[in-house]
Each structure stands twice: as structure tokens, then as C-alpha cells.
Image (cartoon, rainbow, N blue to C red):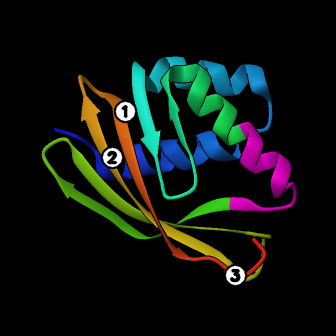
């Protein structure tokens, strides 16, 4: 059975990891090699594609961190959770909800939705 909290928190930890080598290790350990990520603004395939997306977000928002909002939930190998992106200590100006499909204990796909984006972000 899929542990929804473990999947969501591991996913958020990956997006917050600044060391490229460590991020690649996390991808190799927790994501399928053919994993796919898509949201309204970007998409990436495989470890290289996902790593590139994360590096781009970190470059654009160097002082922001992701955090899980509320409690992750789901059924079977499907996980849903909400997240916030912003500076520590304040309400996140950017928020979204992601849907994760897990295959053989690894993240196989992510479909992301952006719930709140300030103008100019």
C-alpha cells in the first residue's frame, strides 16, 4: 500500500534540494526512470527532464521553498496533495495541487495544478 505522506513529503524534499548531485540520487531512488511531469506551465520526462524543471524553478525563486499544505490523501497508488511555494515564515504566494501515480513504489507521473499564482510570478 502506498504511504501518501511519504510520497508527498519525499516529493517536496526533492523540489527543495539545492545540491544537484543529491537531487539526482533522490530521483534515482524514488522516481521511475520514465517518469513524467506536467503542469500548466511546464513539462518534463525522465530524471533529466524533472531535474531540469526543478533547477529552473529554484533559479527563478532562489529564496522560496516548497511545503506540503494540509494532509496528503488518495487511494491505491494515486496520491493527491496541496503545496505552497514561498519564503519561510509567511503564507505561500504560490499554491498548487498535485496528483501522483506510483508504480512499483516509485513516482511514475505527476499532474500538477496551479491554484494560486500572483501576477508577475
Residue position for label 1: 107
x 30%, y 50%: residue: 4
x 60%, y 63%: residue: 67
Seen from this angle, which residue lies furthest left? 76
Q: In this orientation, which residue lies closer to the viewer: 86 or 116?
A: 116
Residue 72 drawn in magenta: no
Residue position for label 3: 118
Q: CA distance from mark 2 to mark 3?
A: 25 Å
Is disc 3 surrounded by few (<14), some (14 to 19) or many (20+) residues within 10 Å? few
Q: Please report whichever mark, 2 or 1, sits nearer to the chain's N-terminal start.
A: 2
The quadrant of the image that shows the C terminus is bottom right
The residue segment tinted magenta is: 55-65
Marks 2/1 in contact by CB < 8 Å: the verdict is yes
Q: Position of residue 80 (x, y in %)?
A: 31, 59
Q: CA distance from mark 2 to mark 1?
A: 7 Å
Q: Which mark is residue 100?
A: 2
Amino acid at each position: 500500500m502506498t504511504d501518501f505522506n511519504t510520497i508527498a513529503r519525499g516529493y517536496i524534499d526533492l523540489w527543495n534540494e539545492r545540491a544537484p548531485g543529491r537531487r539526482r540520487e533522490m530521483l534515482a531512488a524514488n522516481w521511475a526512470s520514465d517518469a513524467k511531469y506536467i503542469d500548466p506551465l511546464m513539462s518534463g520526462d525522465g530524471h533529466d527532464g524533472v531535474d531540469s524543471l526543478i533547477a529552473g524553478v529554484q533559479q527563478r525563486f532562489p529564496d522560496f521553498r516548497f511545503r506540503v499544505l494540509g494532509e496528503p490523501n488518495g487511494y491505491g497508488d494515486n496520491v493527491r496533495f496541496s503545496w505552497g511555494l514561498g519564503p519561510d515564515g509567511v503564507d505561500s504566494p504560490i499554491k498548487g495541487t498535485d496528483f501522483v501515480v506510483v508504480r512499483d513504489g516509485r513516482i511514475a507521473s505527476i499532474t500538477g495544478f496551479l491554484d494560486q499564482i500572483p501576477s508577475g510570478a
